[in-house]
Amino acid sequence: MPKKVAIIMGSDSDLDTLRPAFKALASFGVEYEARVISAHRTPEVAAKYASEAAANGFGVMIAAAGKAAHLAGAIAANTTLPVIGVPVKSSTLDGLDALLSTVQMPSGVPVATVAIDGAANAALLAVQMLALAEDTLAAKLVEYKAKLAAETLEKDMALQEKL
């Protein structure tokens, strides 16, 4: 059975930031579950969800949070699954605080980190990870990359015609 992706947001205010991840996963036919779980307000729930994720059919976890952004690290501390952190631009520091909190993990507790508000890339990275064990998904990624290349070449041709 194909693995699912867990998408965890620290607050429901992160929902709009994560919509591109939902869309990307759906476009590849990857099942996902989205939850609001806080590393600070519901730490026991976060630990339990992370520790049971593999047994519940998940293959990758995406954790999005702003400000102190401890969610990805809290999740990674409680699972052996890959965790992808999405720093969210939600404070006066324009997301730099969340980026630094997410990317500065201690040795032994890795978190892959994408750009601030980079939910679409988090989903694509999750798809790439799952595709290591799923040939059908790997084939979809090859098609996706070819489509990206074709679109870029078309844009270049249009530019050349304008010049």
Image (tube, helix red, strand yellow):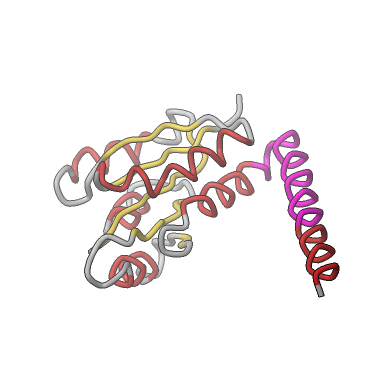
Q: Is residue 54 above or below residue 158?
A: above
Is residue 95 highlighted in magenta? no
Q: Residue furthest front?
A: 162
Q: Relative to the observer, which residue lies in front, 128 or 87?
A: 87
Q: Residue at x 36, y 68 (%)?
A: 99
Q: Residue at (80%, 63%) from the top-left corner? A: 158
Q: Percent x, y for residue 131?
A: 67, 42
> Which residue is nearer to you in this view: 146 or 64?
146
The quadrant of the rendering that contains the C terminus is: bottom right
Q: Which of these two is toward me, 86 or 104? A: 86
Magenta range: 131-151
Residue 101 appears at what percent x and percent y? Answer: 31, 68
Q: Given the current orientation, which residue lies at the most extreme left position?
A: 41
Image point (22%, 38%), residue name: 45
Q: Where is residue 7 drawn, in percent x and y?
A: 40, 41
Furthest residue in direction bottom, as rendered: 163
Towards the viewer: 77 or 99: 99
What kind of secondary structure does the magenta stretch mostly adopt?
A: helix
Instruction: Say whether residue 141 is magenta.
Output: yes
Q: Position of residue 121 (x, y in %)?
A: 54, 54
Quadrant of res 9: top left
Q: Left or right of 144: which side holds 22?
A: left
Residue located at (28% from left, 59% from top): 66
